[in-house]
Amino acid sequence: MNSSEETADPAAVFACAVSLRDACEAKAAASAINLSDTFNGGDQFWRELMRIGTLFETWACENVAFEVLEDVWPYRLEAQFGSASLERFDVGGLARFDATDCPVVAMTMQLPLWYRDGRHLPLDVSAPNPVAGSAFVKWRIQTVRLHAEDEEMVPMVYGDEPHDTDFEPPVVALYGVDAAGLLEHIRDSDSYAEARSLVMKLAPGVVFPEVPVVRVANDGGQPTE
């Protein structure tokens, strides 16, 4: 996992700022927006770009799973960060960009993220069942949450808004999966650590990572690990 001693890389911060500048300028040209007026001057525009870049890079040092990221990080940021941010905000709303927006922008960029309990990220990981003769060929741990209006539990998948007010906070569900791929719900837990502990008792020898990675699958669906 990323060391807590990691600090923001100036090259990454600048890549964020340049990417966001380019995206804002393209949007401004297409929509007849005066960036100087919007940000009370060019200097303030750049201060805002650097603030957002520093915020995102600082968050990324703690949350992006660089170990499985195949791209050169500043290049990935320069190519994608600006457009991903403007999917979250319009140009005039960038002053509201804060830490709660970082995971949404990161998932728009399809970045791999460390899953940590309490941060409301989507999770879907599976592992083969080592117990011979079991009805289950594998185990699955997945985040689910209650839709307030429908009162139905639905999976929380990669790209979902972590703090969507239409849903209750997510819980971590443990399932057994049979040979036909059918799921049998075992139990909901408040944390991944609790679900992992339970399945390790039910199936000694099963391997789930202590800290899993949240990432989008190649087909756009949820991955298994």
Image (cartoon, rainbow, N blue to C red):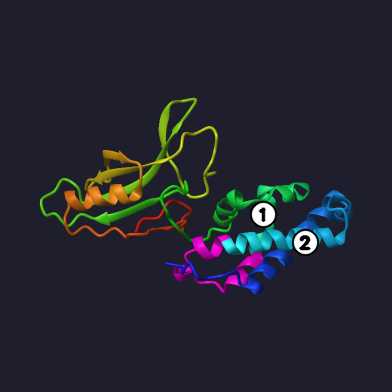
Q: Is residue 15 left or right of residue 139?
A: right
Please state the extent of the stretch shown in magenta in the rendering: 59-79
Question: Nearer the N terminus, badge 1 or badge 2?
Answer: 2
Give the residue number, with chain letter if any, for mark 1.
85
- The residue at 54%/38% (across/down) is 164
Where disc 2 sits, the SS reads helix
> How far across and how far down the image is residue 94, in percent?
73, 51
Q: Is residue 53 left or right of residue 192?
A: right
**The C terminus lies in quadrant:** bottom left
| 224, above or below 61, in the image | above
| 82, above or below 145, in the image | below
> How far across and how far down the image is residue 180, in percent?
24, 45
| Gap between marks 1 and 2 measured at Cα | 16 Å
Q: Is residue 64 magenta?
A: yes
- The residue at 51%/63% (across/down) is 62
Of badges 1 and 2, nearer the viewer stands 2
Q: Out of 210 and 138, give the one closest to the viewer.
A: 210
- The residue at 54%/72% (across/down) is 71
| 200, above or below 168, in the image | below
Where disc 1 sits, the SS reads helix
Q: Is residue 152 magenta?
A: no
Q: Out of 224 and 170, give the one closest to the viewer.
A: 170
> How far across and how far down the image is residue 179, in percent?
22, 48
Give the residue number, with chain letter if any, for mark 2.
47
